[in-house]
Each structure stands twice: as structure tokens, then as C-alpha cells.
Amino acid sequence: AQSVTQLDSHVSVSEGTPVLLRCNYSSSYSPSLFWYVQHPNKGLQLLLKYTSAATLVKGINGFEAEFKKSETSFHLTKPSAHMSDAAEYFCVVSEGYGGSQGNLIFGKGTKLSVKP
Amino acid sequence: NAGVTQTPKFQVLKTGQSMTLQCAQDMNHNSMYWYRQDPGMGLRLIYYSASEGTTDKGEVPNGYNVSRLNKREFSLRLESAAPSQTSVYFCASWDPWDSYKDGYTFGSGTRLTVV
């Protein structure tokens, strides 16, 4: 069974400093991995996705993530935080085969706070 | 605009009442999903429909039923609402043949409170 663990429930950074949101996954097959962002009282927006192409994936708003199979990790980073980055971030794995293909397994979320 | 439309956006129910959450997509996607979001729990899959005419249970199906009315519409029914079903509900759609082109498309959510 596939699963996702987000290692921090809450991360706080100062504006202009780097952001690191950590995610480990468990998968029996070659996974597809995603990061979604949710701003307060809003829906979910796709930040980036990994689907077995390049291991370093660039997304919107300056975010990127690196797929490391040996570490079963897919950490999300950004060089310089902006106030508008304050939101909740979800790491997500997709089951790749069988009748449940396409089902998304969500991590529990990391709430990012950005201090001025 | 193409996407996933959920109705209603907000709803308050009394314990024991029933209601149906509606979801429609206009992207000709085969697969549709219902998730619930609770604080600290992420999103959990309630039911999904891999294609028109099929439905399957997800992680937390108890207390819910679904209907895949046609390719566009996938409804979620609460027969006898309970306070534990207070949550934000998201509908999503996806198609395997899109090959993860833009990820999964989510609706804007229904905020349900059961008192």
C-alpha cells in the first residue's frame, strides 16, 4: 500500500529565507508524486508533479522538488520565502496500477508560516 | 471555464437529516473522486468512480453513498448526517489518458456542518 509522511506539521520561516518542506513516501510501484498548496479557505492548487521524467521538478511560484528514490523522499524547496507563500502544503502520491489507478493518497499537511 | 463544479458551497444540517452533494465536471474525464478534509488529517478518499457505471469505496466510506449519474456527474449522499461528518468535502476528476498533464482537478469544496 502506498503512503505519504510529511515530517513537519508546521514550519515557520522569515521572509526572504529558504523554505524546506519534507515528504517521504512509500510505494510498491514507480509512484507519481505531487505537491498541492491550499491557501486559507481556498481550494487545492497543483504546485508541481513528478511522473518518472526528470528527478528535479520545477513548479509554480519558484518552488521545486527533488525525487530521491534511494531516500524515498520528495522534499519541496524554495530559495526565498514570500509572505504570500503562507499556506498549507500537501504531499501526495498516486497509485499507479490496477483498479485504483489515479487515487490520490494525501499526507496530513504542513502549515507554512512566513514572518515579516 | 472548464473545471469541477460543486454545490452547495456551504450547508448546515441537523443530526439525522439527509442531503446530497453535487459534483459535475466538463472535461470529459473518466474518473471522479470524493474526498473529505479534516484538520490535521489531510484529505481522505471517501468513494471514487474509475469510469461511468462503476463506484468503489475509498478509505472512509461509512455513512456515505455515491451515484455516478453519467460521465459528468458524481454525487455524494449522506443518508443520516452525524456530527462526525462535519468536514470540508472536495470533488475531483482525472483521466488516465491525460497522463498527468495538469494533475487532478478539484472543485472549490463544500463546507458542511452537522449540529
Image: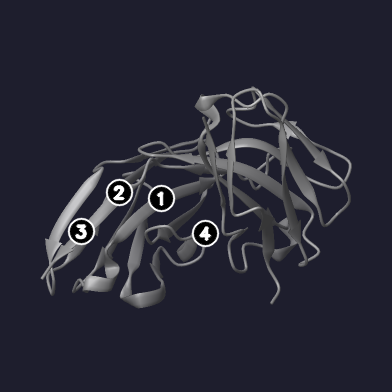
Q: Quadrant of residue B16?
A: top right
Specify which label sits upstream in the sequence, 4 or 1. Answer: 4
Specify which label sits upstream in the sequence, 2 or 4. Answer: 4
Neighbourhood count class around disc 1 (C-alpha, 10 Å): few under 14, some 14–19, many 20 upward? many
- Any mark on residue A113, and which? 3
The amino acid type, in three-letter code, at marker 2 is Thr
1 and 2 marks on the same chain: yes
How far is mark 2 from mark 4, CA to CA? 24 Å
Neighbourhood count class around disc 2 (C-alpha, 10 Å): few under 14, some 14–19, many 20 upward? many
**Chain letter behind tag 2:** A
Answer with left or right where residue B85 lies relative to residue B16.
left
- Any mark on residue A91, and which? 1
2 and 3 marks on the same chain: yes
The amino acid type, in three-letter code, at marker 1 is Cys
| Residue at the spot of label 4 | A52
Neighbourhood count class around disc 3 (C-alpha, 10 Å): few under 14, some 14–19, many 20 upward? many
The spot of residue A37 in percent (x, y) is 40, 60
Kindly identify the residue that appears in the image at 32 percent across and 76 percent down. Answer: A62
The spot of residue A80 in percent (x, y) is 18, 74
Residues at circles 3 and 1 in contact by the CB criterion of under 8 Å:
no
